[in-house]
Image (cartoon, grey):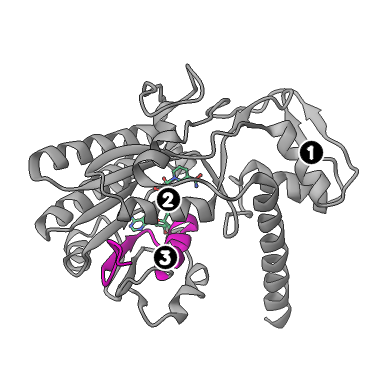
């Protein structure tokens, strides 16, 4: 049966990153004509695209890839029927560099919206974030939950959504914004200062140290696997709804303590958990209601935490072995 993606050219902005590279792969499972990646590779990597680029329908836009370079962006959007926009500076980067956050996340998103209108793009899917909600005042958070955000990052996502609304009302630009909960899975960062909690726990286990959990470990999140998030993007491109913002999560609440216990179990470790006082985090409680996305986009998550964490552990191990082998050869 033909779908809305038959024969389409899709531009994936930020397509070399964690979510973007999985979106590219999910799109290539569809009967699309072409998938073009537009990325400045500030965080994304060519390696993330290794698989996808074997498909002759996939390529990297050759002239450049920055959302702040308006003419180049415009040239890339001109060739596309549909656009997925994922390029952004992330939470801690925005925290440290609010001006860059403004340039990339807000101005950059505005540039994308303008180019989409200029070139009559049929549909745009924008990566928003559950950060727009901040700490939950009611649970599970539906799309009507207030914007209880206090971060620069969340502010840029709210701005992006509001711009999208205005572009829809003013120019009829169709599209959907997706508010991801906590995304995890293969290709997730595990080096550097700002790594996700699950990678820190796995690092501890590797070193033979009991993983550290701050406070009592009751901080709870909605962890959603990156391949499910990628599928949500594809569903959003295919959906008929003209405009809207949707949670992308599981609706399942997992505490950091439960996460640490699961990782200990999956790695066959009997180290136990070391609880330490303190540990600042931006948001301590967040679970999204997935019902609206299921109703309007036909998206429902499939990968549970156990299976998903196993895929992360396997990928991390393989990736580390590859890095060691490469450095051994160097
Ligand atoms: N990972 C999460 O838990 C999560 C949660 C909520 C929302 N999001 C949003 O989803 C999107 C994708 O997130 P991700 O986790 O894949 O992040 P990521 O950093 O892996 O991917 C972002 C991509 O954008 C690119 N990029 C950055 N600045 C750019 C610029 N100026 N021009 C062009 N490309 C640029 C990066 O090189 C990278 O490939 C982002 O918009 C992010 O804010 C992510």
Q: Earlier along the polypeptide chain: callout 1 or callout 3?
A: 3
Looking at the image, can residue 97 be seen?
A: no
> Residue 238: percent from the left, percent from the top?
31, 55
> Residue 231: percent from the left, percent from the top?
45, 55
Residue at the limit of the structure toward the front, as seen here: 1
Between marks 3 and 2, how big is the CA–CA gap?
A: 12 Å
Q: Confirm or deny contact between disc 2 and disc 1 (CB under 8 A).
A: no
Q: Residue 24 carries which label?
A: 3
- Reading the image, the residue beneath label 2 is 232
Q: Which of marks 2 and 1 is in front?
A: 2
Between marks 2 and 1, how big is the CA–CA gap?
A: 28 Å
* Total marks in image: 3
Q: Along the horizontal axis of the image, is 251 left or right of 80?
A: right
Q: Confirm or deny contact between disc 1 and disc 3 (CB under 8 A).
A: no
Label 1, secondary structure: give it.
Answer: helix
Label 2, secondary structure: give it.
Answer: helix
The residue at 36%/63% (across/down) is 39
| Region in magenta | 1-28
The residue at 42%/50% (across/down) is 232
Q: Nearer the viewer, residue 140 or 238?
A: 238
- Reading the image, the residue beneath label 1 is 261
The residue at 8%/40% (across/down) is 170
The residue at 67%/77% (across/down) is 326
> Residue 199: percent from the left, percent from the top?
68, 48
Is 22 a magenta residue? Answer: yes
**Residue 315 against residue 295 in the figure, above or below:** below
Label 3, secondary structure: give it.
Answer: helix
Where, quadrant-wise, is the N terminus in this rendering? bottom left
Residue at the limit of the structure toward the right, as seen here: 270
**Residue 164 against residue 76 in the figure, above or below:** above
């Amino acid at each position: 049966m033909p779908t809305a993606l038959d024969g389409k050219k899709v531009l994936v902005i930020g397509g070399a990153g964690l979510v973007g590279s999985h979106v590219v792969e999910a799109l290539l499972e569809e009967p699309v004509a072409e998938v073009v990646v537009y990325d400045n590779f500030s965080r994304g990597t060519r390696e993330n695209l290794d698989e996808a680029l074997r498909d002759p329908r996939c390529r990297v836009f050759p002239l450049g890839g920055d959302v702040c370079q308006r003419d180049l962006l415009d040239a890339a959007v001109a060739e596309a029927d549909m656009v997925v926009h994922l390029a952004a500076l992330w939470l801690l980067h925005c925290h440290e560099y609010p001006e860059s956050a403004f340039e990339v996340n807000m101005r950059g998103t505005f540039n994308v919206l303008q180019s989409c209108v200029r070139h009559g793009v049929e549909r745009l899917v924008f990566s928003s974030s559950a950060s727009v909600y901040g700490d939950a005042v009611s649970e599970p958070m539906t799309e009507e939950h207030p914007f209880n955000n206090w971060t620069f990052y969340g502010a840029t996502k709210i701005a992006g959504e509001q711009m999208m609304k205005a572009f829809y009302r003013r120019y009829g630009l169709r599209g959907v914004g997706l508010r991801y909960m906590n995304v995890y899975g293969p290709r997730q960062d595990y080096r550097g200062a700002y790594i996700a909690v699950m990678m820190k726990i796995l690092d501890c286990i590797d070193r033979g140290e009991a993983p550290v959990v701050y406070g009592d470990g009751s901080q709870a999140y909605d962890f959603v696997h990156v391949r499910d998030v990628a599928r949500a993007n594809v569903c959003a491109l295919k959906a008929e709804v003209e405009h809207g913002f949707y949670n992308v999560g599981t609706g399942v609440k997992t505490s950091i303590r439960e996460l640490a216990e699961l990782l200990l179990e999956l790695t066959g470790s009997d180290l136990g958990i070391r609880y330490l006082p303190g540990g600042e985090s931006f948001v301590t409680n967040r679970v999204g209601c997935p019902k609206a996305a299921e109703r309007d986009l036909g998206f429902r998550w499939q990968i549970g935490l156990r299976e998903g964490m196993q895929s992360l552990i396997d990928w991390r191990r393989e990736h580390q072995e590859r890095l060691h082998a490469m450095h051994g050869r160097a």
